[in-house]
Image: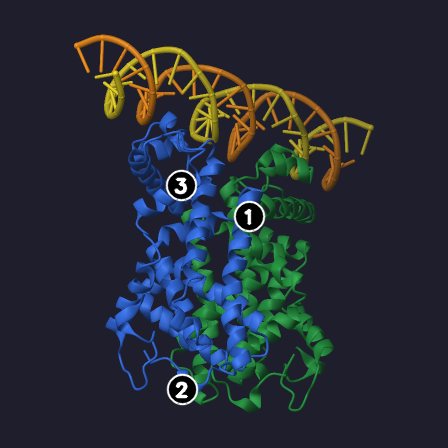
Chain colours: A green, B blue, C yellow, D orange
DNA sequence: CATAAAATTGAGCGAGCGCTCGATTTTTTT
DNA sequence: AAAAAAATCGAGCGCTCGCTCAATTTTATG
């Protein structure tokens, strides 16, 4: 995996590797799964076979896709709570009763989406290519660009999770906190290993790891702002890498290529 | 203002200035206004004299305080949208009709709170003491610790604003974005000046300023996490100062005292 | 092509919502 | 202490919400 582009953002005297990086970003996700609406809904169907009453998978997946597409669109505009099932029904073309073949309550629907987001996040970030995971600096760099690429590929899902996770049922709240801590633990792992090996000089690796999450969240939460400023996903990832590596006191020979 | 403690976190060979810093944190806010529930509600009353139908200020302020206290508590637990006026009435001891002497719609109530948060934020952060504002490094350090102190003093207000600003009426959305950009502009001012004067070596001051906001937000948004880890407001401010100054390549002679 | 199974429909239910307004109590003025 | 003004009250209005289920249409089977 990751093959031809080689060394993951590290290239001794390199300049302007934008094209390569963009390819790599997509490549970093390519093997990890299918992030299309259909693929994600297939995964939801698997995790909720007991609740979903429609038996035929191809029918269920297609309709789930229409339903969830609609919910993400409406909720990200006006909030999940403010989006009624009647609206969802009208916009998706699925009747009121039809919706209830796919979930038993509005809360379940919320949990389906939150669950898919956290499942995708951990399954992607926990599986860095071996050659990257060896070097803490490269590993952290990979985590940052992969996180940005993932949130890019599942943008409306992450926006939804961010907006709605807080104001909802205990189960959802707990799941969200756990998911976030899992992500943070992955960051912390790389930073602590780097500190032990002398790649980073940082007093408090746990704190640095905790700060990284909000930095990465800003990319999808304030998307409009970054677009207005003409910053691309690659540009954002590169800048965060630079910023964080400097804050961690990364050894100079590893410093990423300037934007 | 800020008087006796002197130089704002900078002290050549200093160690363990915790006590001083804590005093300074409160002092930094002391002259800027009254951040008690009463004081904040007095400010709201001033800005909404036309909507609020109760004429006597002392009565209006006292009751507003009870109402808003209740709303902040309930909303931060279960969301503003999910909190009904009947609940607010029961919990605050003000009748349904009574509530409507203080606002003409639930949306107005939301805007009152959001407005107070952004008013307080800009009025505080825009008024750094002159001796601090002179030096960009000290200025940035002051902005960080004052922001943390302010969000500490108005914790439920900031949590509310963070949770509810997104999913509501256009007016509130716009106000929130503007308020955030104002804060960011203040950060950017200090960082750009520092870069020009050579105190910082940073490629993209605007980007660094934009990243600072989410770092400071994490303090009040994930409050439970930080408390669980035993990190105080002072500790958080100090760590963010260290982290950010390192990322900005601040000159060593200005580096803050180690925790 | 008949029949069983699966999928889909939407009017209707009870509940709770934001909000109003005439009646009532409290406070101030004379 | 009476009258005027200010503040407070809460039952009730119209409406929309999440959700259900008997009836219907669509699809698969022998």
Distance in Å between CA atoms under marks 3 and 1: 22 Å
Instruction: Give whichever of D28, C23 is nearer the camera.
Output: C23
Mark 3 or 1, which is nearer the eye? 3
Measuring from the top left, give residue B137's x and y in whole percent: 44, 77
Q: Are marks 3 and 2 on the same chain?
A: yes
Q: Work out whether residue B23 can be spotted.
A: yes
Asked whether C21 or A66 is in front, the reply is: C21
The residue wearing badge 3 is: B46
- N-terminal of the pair, mark 3 or mark 2, is 3
Residue B245 placement (x, y as % from top left): 45, 78
Q: Residue A240: which quarter of the image? A: bottom right
The image position of residue B249, as x and y in percent, is 49, 82
Q: Which type of secondary structure does the marked residue at label 2 adopt? A: helix
Q: Which residue is mark 2?
A: B253
Q: What mark, if any, has residue B62 been given in the picture?
A: none
Which of A32 and B168 lies nearest the eye of the viewer?
A: B168
Please state the chain letter of the residue tagged with numbered disc 3 in the rendered image: B
User: Can you give x and y, in whole percent of width and height, for residue B79 in the image?
Assistant: 43, 44
Which of the two labelled residues, at mark 3 and mark 1, occupies the earlier sequence position?
3
Rendered position, A222 above or below B239: above
The residue drawn where x is 61% and y is 60% is A225
**Earlier along the polypeptide chain: callout 1 or callout 2?**
1
Q: Is residue A254 left or right of residue B255?
A: right
User: Residue B173 has which mark?
Assistant: 1
**Chain label for disc 1:** B
Give the CA separation, mark 3 to mark 2.
Answer: 46 Å
- The residue carrying pointer 1 sits among few (fewer than 14), some (14 to 19) or many (20 or more) residues within 10 Å by Cα, namely some
């Amino acid at each position: 995996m990751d093959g031809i582009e080689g060394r993951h953002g590290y290239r001794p005297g390199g300049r302007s590797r934008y094209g390569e990086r963009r390819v790599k970003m997509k490549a970093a996700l390519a093997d990890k799964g299918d992030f299309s609406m259909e693929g994600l809904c297939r995964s939801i169907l698997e995790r909720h076979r007991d609740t979903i009453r429609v038996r035929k998978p191809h029918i269920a997946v297609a309709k789930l896709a229409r339903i969830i597409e609609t919910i993400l669109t409406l909720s990200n505009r006006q909030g999940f709570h403010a989006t009624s099932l009647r609206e969802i029904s009208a916009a998706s073309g699925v009747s009121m009763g039809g919706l209830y073949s796919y979930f038993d309550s509005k809360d379940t629907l919320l949990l389906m989406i939150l669950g898919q987001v956290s499942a995708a996040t951990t399954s992607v970030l926990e599986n860095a290519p071996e050659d990257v995971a060896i070097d803490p600096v490269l590993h952290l760099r990979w985590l940052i660009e992969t996180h940005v690429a993932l949130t890019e590929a599942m943008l409306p899902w992450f926006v939804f999770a961010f907006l709605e996770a807080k104001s909802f049922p205990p189960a959802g709240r707990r799941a969200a906190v756990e998911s976030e801590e899992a992500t943070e633990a992955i960051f912390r792992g790389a930073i602590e290993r780097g500190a032990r090996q002398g790649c980073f000089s940082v007093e408090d690796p746990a704190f640095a790891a905790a700060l990284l999450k909000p930095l990465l969240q800003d990319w999808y939460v304030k998307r409009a702002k970054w677009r207005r400023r003409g910053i691309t996903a690659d540009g954002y990832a590169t800048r965060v890498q630079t910023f964080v590596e400097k804050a961690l006191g990364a050894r100079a020979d590893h410093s990423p290529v300037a934007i």
